[in-house]
Image (cartoon, rainbow, N blue to C red):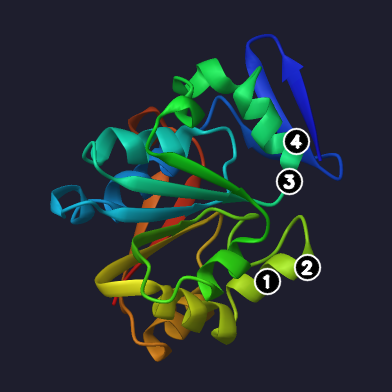
Amino acid sequence: MRLGRSGSEYVILANGKPLMSSRMHGSEEALATLACEAARLAPRPRVLVGGLGMGFTLRAVLDVLPPDAIVTVAELVPAVVDWNRRVLGPLAGHPLQDPRVRVQLGDVGFTLRGNVGGFDVILLDVDNGPSAFTAEANAGLYDNRGVAAAHAALRTPGTLAVWSAWEDRKFEQRLRYNGFRVTVSRVRARLKKGGPMHTIFLGVK
């Protein structure tokens, strides 16, 4: 994984293929606002963000949540955290500097399994969604065991929000099978400014 730049645009590439761009982050922001709609009114909400990316999802989460929230960011790749602390930081207003944020380097799956009933909201923006793109190990977040772990890590009622580059009916069924009430939203990468369509799965426990 590496970071590239063309003019004012930053791109994170995985195995030489574009994974995300600083020009298209509207759907990541929509992921946060949809997921945290109920939690913004909860006392001291606890939120887990799986996958830091370029920080746009985290910034949108922080903009919605109250001052007493605690937001844990689980990021597998140390370089991504380093980029966000330095060159990418200004893009989203330096969200890692917010005192509500806790960064955990490692697999978000370990965080899920180690915090049963620990979160009001879980956001997963890892890889390109349920169909793994950068690493086959990421698929373990989206299979039955991974979805069950996310369900167990949520308080009741709690929300699991999953970003995906594509629609996935099997994953939608898997969420229902594991006890979630599911809605699916299709949003533009740049929201009202267009771009490709992305999918957001919302599962309420």
Q: Nearer the viewer, mark 3 or mark 1?
A: 3
Q: CA distance from mark 1 to mark 4?
A: 21 Å
Could you say whether the residue bearing mark 2 is in a helix, strand or loop?
A: helix
Q: Which residue is mark 3?
A: 77
Q: Residues within 10 Å of mark 4 (few under 14, many from 20)?
A: few
Q: Which residue is mark 2?
A: 136
Q: CA distance from mark 3 to mark 1?
A: 16 Å
Q: CA distance from mark 4 to mark 3?
A: 5 Å
Q: Which residue is mark 4?
A: 79
Say which label, 1 or 4, has the lower sequence index: 4
Say which label, 2 or 3, has the lower sequence index: 3
What residue sits 41% from the left and 29% below the top?
Answer: 98
Q: Nearer the viewer, mark 2 or mark 3?
A: 3
Q: Residues within 10 Å of mark 1 (few under 14, many from 20)?
A: some
- Image-based side of 90 in relation to 110, left or right: left
Q: Which residue is mark 1?
A: 139
Q: Are marks 4 and 3 in contact (CB under 8 Å)?
A: yes
Q: CA distance from mark 2 to mark 3?
A: 15 Å
Res 94 label: none
Q: Are marks 1 and 2 in contact (CB under 8 Å)?
A: yes
Amino acid under disc 3: Val
State the residue lying farthest toward the left. 41
The answer to whether residue 161 is seen in the rendering is: yes
Q: Nearer the viewer, mark 4 or mark 2?
A: 4
Amino acid under disc 4: Ala
Amino acid under disc 1: Ala
